[in-house]
Amino acid sequence: MSADTPDMSDLTPATDDGPGFDLGPVPAVPAAAATPYRVLARKYRPQTFADLIGQEAMVRTLSNAFTSGRIAQAYILTGVRGVGKTTTARILARALNYEPADGPVGGGAPTLDMPVLGRHCRDIIESRHVDVQEMDAASNTGIGDIREIIEAARYKPVLARYKVFIIDEVHMLSTAAFNGLLKTLEEPPEHVKFIFATTEIRKVPVTVLSRTQRFDLRRVEAGTLARHLHGICTAEGVNIDAEALSLIARAAEGSVRDALSLLDQAIAHSGGQTSGAMVHGEQVRALLGLADRGRVIDLFEALMKGDIAQALTELREQYDSGADPAVVIADLAEFTHLVTRMKILPETADDAALVEAERTRGRDFARGLSMRGLSRAWQMLTKGLSEVQQAAKPMQAAEMVLVRLAYASDLPTPDEALRRLRDGAQEAPAPRPSGGGAGMGGGSGGGSAMAATAPRSYAAPVSAPSSAPSAASHLSVASRSAPQPAAPVAQPAQAAAPAPGLAVSSFEDLVALAASKRDLKLKFALENHLRLVAFEDGRLEVALAPGGSTHLIQELQSKISEWTGRRWLVALSREEGEPTVAEKAAAQRDAMMTGVRADPLVAAALARFPGAAIVDVRSLATEEPAGDFTTDTNDADLMAARDDGPGADDDIEF
């Protein structure tokens, strides 16, 4: 530019749309508008393997493989959404083609140690490197797209060490596309690497899986995710409390991308980044539509105390505050599961994702509530959740779930009921006050009920005196009350089957022999369709019961002769004969049932549990020493209890 030429650099250019259309100077574009906002999920995307969280196993395997030079030709990454499959694929492409920027072109070797950006790193990260091609299989599903990859794989890379093909959502490829890729995938050129990513690993053909190294990216634990979010908030200058971080981490369900998206939304909701205000848990809870965690615990405590009035009031207040009834029931079930885990594994309380109320009060509940009570609460809540989700009026359905749970809280477990009956406590329980009731039964599961008069306090476990006989000994009612048959009926299914070639000494031995030979049809016929008239060694005389066929006689004679290795004669008699094996067993069972019903202990148990009924009585003389005592009432959520001890003769099911 000469000295006579005026300097025009500081003048703002003007538009000239023609004569008379001088619009004046163009306003300067603000600097903030020139740089659009990047969401946290993109801004804090990992750049190296050291930045990945929760995937230590995969990083260690790849690190050892790269160090020893055992680099596979193809990898497949699978996991739920947002755990870093595509990000890991790009980092892996960087590691394969890493070259120090200050080194010679083509120098170095594949490595996971990438302290600074290399010669190709920036282009690979921004998905614009000529030798690293990314393809979305959801929009490129056909064999034509795979042909392009196969054709490109024939040529060596232009700039980098390897030509890398990243195929995202690979399970969306068609069958023809998968088949067309197999040959190249199994024997690719030495300069080609494949990296696949998918959320549906089961939809990928096994022929593809067998040609790749598979890495399952794990869900990130809530505690690890909460710490990661805290570091990002510190870098962004956002003030956020621990409860908000915990809520976001748990709502993300192990997905880092979901967690960062929720964090972005929570910061915008509270205005924390612009005003410097604190992002509180209440704001995140309102944003996610969750119930207050502390209030959920209060509701759980009221239910465990049987205080249905307080529970319904608390549920109504949460509903008026915007909480979804189904979410409240789900939160109660989740807290029940947490308390159960704390009871079994006390170190569960050390989880960083738990808020202080869950940690401290959960420990108290774990010490005071029984395992059977917690299991019963879990069953009722999970069944009630489906009812609430399907109900036309979810709030009413949720209230009825709480009513059932609160009124079941003071029902004794079966072993407690037997203990009370044994100790003489057969009087009817006191009427339930409108404001509360007794806590959940403890029983042998460890710990008993929460006292209704003292919130968060627990009564001592109820235990029987050591000198008292066990409850199982009081179940031996059939042997004391039922009339005994003159000749005990042997259980044919459990009798020792005679070996072939040996004498069969009784009709029951024939039934057992048929069972041992797995001839169930003949065994059923022997038990139900034949009446014994006479039995001798080598000769059997029987009569047909209703439903029996004459063809059974010849079949029985043939089978017995074959099994015993000697000739048998089976004759059909006109006499009535003895009752069938099934009729004898039914008669014995009826006799035992009559004796059981007359027993005072059983009568008291039936009176204590309205709607209960005796459904079976089994003799332990031919069964295992340990028996089951099961109470089946109109409420299917009552638990089963086992109480075995010396002198237990019979096993009774109500």
Image (spheres, rainbow, N blue to C red):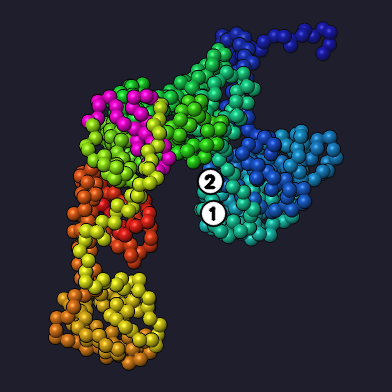
Of residues 412 and 14, the one nearer the viewer is: 412
Residue at left 69%, top 57%? 188
Q: Which residue is mark 1?
A: 204
Image vertical order of residue 501 relative to residue 165, above or below: below
The answer to which of marks 1 and 2 sits earlier in the sequence is 2
**Number of other residues with Cα within 10 Å of mark 1, as a class: few under 14, some 14 to 19, many 20 or more:** some
Is 543 part of what is drawn in magenta? Answer: no
Q: How far from the left and from the top, in percent, is residue 314?
A: 33, 24
Q: Element type at marker 2?
A: loop
Residue at left 83%, top 43%? 107
Distance CA(mark 1)–CA(mark 2): 10 Å
Of residues 291 and 426, the one nearer the viewer is: 426
Magenta stretch prevailing secondary structure: loop
Give the extent of the magenta segment: 431-455
Disc 2 marks a residue whose amino acid type is Thr
So how many labels did they put on this image?
Answer: 2
Is residue 582 found left or right of 375 in the rendered image?
Answer: left
Image vertical order of residue 286 relative to residue 363, above or below: above
Q: Which mark is residue 199?
A: 2
Is residue 34 found left or right of 582 in the rendered image?
Answer: right
Image vertical order of residue 290 relative to residue 555, above or below: above
Is residue 260 found left or right of 110 in the rendered image?
Answer: left
Image vertical order of residue 315 relative to residue 391, above or below: above
Of residues 520 and 218, the one nearer the viewer is: 520
Q: How far from the left and from the top, in percent, is residue 23?
A: 57, 10
Q: How far from the left and from the top, in percent, is residue 73?
A: 69, 54
Q: Quadrant of residue 371?
A: top left
Q: Quadrant of residue 383?
A: top left
User: Which residue is at the far bottom?
Assistant: 567
Disc 1 marks a residue whose amino acid type is Val
Residue at left 16%, top 76%? 546
Q: Quadrant of the N terminus?
A: top right
